[in-house]
Amino acid sequence: MRPALLFILVLTAISFADMGDVISTIPAPGGNPDGLTWIDGSLWITSDDDFMIYEIDPSNGNVLSSIPRHGNDYLTGLSYDGSQLISCCHPWIYFRDLPSGTATDSILGPDASCNEGLAWDGSSVWSTNWSGNFVYELDPETGVEISSYYPQNGGVGYEGLTGLAWDGFYLWVTDQSSDMIFANIPGDPYPWKMFPAPCGVVQDLAWDGQYLWTTDYTPDSPMVYQIDPGPPLALTPATWGSIKTEF
């Protein structure tokens, strides 16, 4: 039996019954929630109504603290590099101290009008591009593009990429055109996991170490969803590369 066929059979035997299931929901403060990230047990979320960034309790949505935007445009993606909040306000990506919110550094985003989700993988900043629909890897000190890829499903590119989260292996991405959430191995355009978003206008993503969280960008029902990402798969970039060569 070819390794690729065996691999497919193994995948078929894995239960994905829980993947994409909603674990809980909480209200989003401010209205029109966009950016989202997880920091030390709290969710941080942006509002495009009042241009604030809120720290909220993930168990009930209560506001724990808040900081204003830095910049003069809509707030989009959020991430965290282990010491600073990374916040996007077109066309800049800012590094901000907490709890003060003071911006200590900035880099220019890859698209001056359509930067969206942000993720941090331990060494690079990743950014989605809503209009061009690319995912970019950026140098956090200079903003220079290190790599990029165009996510695809069966050879068809996604449109309206809005959110990112890094779980230590997969780069999770949201797509508004199909209302899907999918996971890539960074740099590989084809999704390894995918499932429908639980809301009408899926926006950014956060990873809490076990679950995904996402925001619903609607004015009448601003909510945050906690989602089961499905079972982990024992892969490494090296083994994934060797599997692909069998197809």
Image: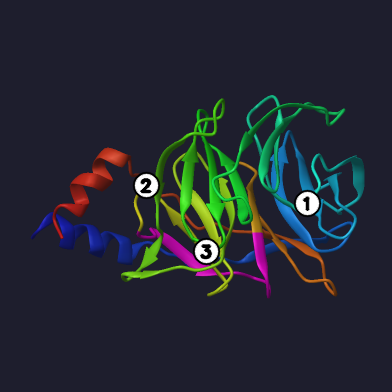
Tell me which segment is drawn in magenta.
Answer: 190-203
Residue receiving disc 1: 73
Side (left or right) of 233 relative to 109: left
Q: Residues within 10 Å of mark 1 (few under 14, many from 20)?
A: some
Q: Which residue is mark 3?
A: 19
Q: Quadrant of the C terminus?
A: bottom left
| Residue 138 percent across, percent down from the top left | 50, 36
Cα distance in 3D space between marks 3 and 1:
35 Å
Mark 1, secondary structure of its residue: loop
Asked whether residue 48 is in view, the answer is yes
Whole-angstrom CA distance, mark 3 to mark 2, is: 23 Å
Amino acid carrying mark 1 in the image: Asp
> Mark 2 against mark 1, which lies toward the viewer?
1
Q: Does the rendering let one see residue 211? A: no
Q: Quadrant of residue 4?
A: bottom left
Where disc 2 sits, the SS reads loop
Q: Nearer the viewer, residue 111 or 40?
A: 111
Which residue in the structure is indicated by mark 2?
A: 187
- Whether the residues at callouts 2 and 1 have beta carbons within 8 Å, the answer is no
The residue type indicated by label 3 comes to Met
Q: Who's the residue at 48% across and 34% down the image?
A: 144
Q: Residue furthest left?
A: 1
The amino acid on which the numbered mark 2 sits, given as a three-letter code, is Gly
